[in-house]
Image (cartoon, rainbow, N blue to C red):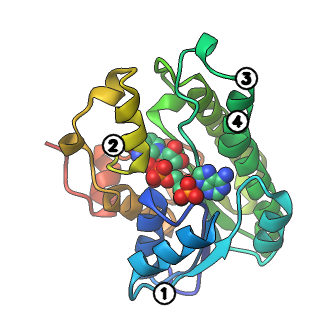
Amino acid sequence: MKLTGKTALVTGGNRGIGLATVRALAEAGAEVHFTARSAPNLTAARRDLGETQATGHLANMTDRIAMATLLDQGFDILVNNAAVIAPIGRILDIPAEDWATSIDINLTSAFHATQRVLAHMVARGGGTIVNISSGAAHRPQEGWSAYCAGKAGLAMLTRSIHLEYGAQGIRIFGFAPGVVDTDMQVAIRASGINPVSKLPRESLAPASEPARAIAWLCTPAADPLAGQELDVRNPELRAASGLPPLP
Ligand SMILES: NC(=O)c1ccc[n+]([C@@H]2O[C@H](COP(=O)([O-])OP(=O)(O)OC[C@H]3O[C@@H](n4cnc5c(N)ncnc54)[C@H](OP(=O)(O)O)[C@@H]3O)[C@@H](O)[C@H]2O)c1
């Protein structure tokens, strides 16, 4: 995998799948930037990254001005990774404001970041956007109405951008990372509300697996898959990106 000469931005790159993606892109030779939304989180990410070269930026996804300033640097690759699972609860049990906050972070902010970076990519003649999707984009889960609606909207945004800008060199992918051992799954297990919350931690995949596939999607080898919603469990994608077959 060679991404030498490419610049990349990973949102929510300070932990979990985002942090693993920062590592994978840097290992592939890209100049990697990532966001974190607090100074302690940025410091922790720098410590976790060790020798890995990457530049962290303080920015909340919902802060349009901070994000625009960052995105106007222009990037060849954007990974829309930042998201929240909250609020977890059946519809009559959650505050409407929390539902709206979830949609703002998981969908509207991803739209804003994409719109901003797209202008630069189109002007330069191309670029790659990976929207981190989920099985929840296509199947409802009890207690996750906000998360499911946000991810379903993001999946449609992926298709809309492919339709409108695919011919102008914009390669966009939706990518479902599987069930991955991150803090998001800690919150899900603590809720105990649906079948996903009952999955034992030992059954979850390490974040390095989806990160490897995300880095592969950023290479020309993935061109034929542009515009699609992909899943880390897809055998062909696993083989092409160098992941072991699933049992
Ligand atoms: N883990 C799974 O099994 C799984 C399955 C399907 C899809 N996904 C998707 O994979 C992506 C990464 O998930 P993860 O499991 O790595 O989650 P995670 O461990 O909870 O990390 C989420 C990241 O997003 C950041 N973030 C959240 N809200 C933000 C905001 N308003 N502005 C900036 N950053 C924000 C977090 O920053 P802070 O550290 O500041 O909170 C953190 O860096 C998400 O899109 C998630 O929906 C995960």
Pointer 4 and pointer 2: residues touching (CB < 8 Å)?
no
Q: CA distance from mark 3 to mark 1?
A: 41 Å
Q: Earlier in the sequence, mark 4 or mark 3?
A: 3
Task: Give the residue displayed 75% in from the left and 29% down from the top.
Answer: 97
Q: CA distance from mark 3 to mark 2?
A: 36 Å
Report the residue marked by disc 2: 234
Q: Of the residues shown, which amino acid type is indicated by label 1?
A: Gln
Q: Is residue 75 above or below residue 118?
A: below
Q: Secondary structure at mark 4?
A: helix
Report the residue marked by disc 4: 103
Q: Is residue 178 above or below residue 74?
A: above
Q: Earlier in the sequence, mark 3 or mark 1?
A: 1
Which of labels 3 and 1 is toward the front? Answer: 3
Position in image of residue 131 (x %, y %): 59, 50
Label 2: few (<14), some (14–19) or many (≥20) C-alpha neighbours in 10 Å: few
Q: Of the residues shown, which amino acid type is indicated by label 2?
A: Asn
Position in image of residue 121 (x %, y %): 76, 68
Q: Of the residues shown, which amino acid type is indicated by label 4?
A: Ile
Q: Secondary structure at mark 3?
A: helix
Q: Secondary structure at mark 2?
A: loop
Position in image of residue 75 (x %, y %): 69, 74
Pointer 1 and pointer 2: residues touching (CB < 8 Å)?
no
Report the residue marked by disc 1: 53
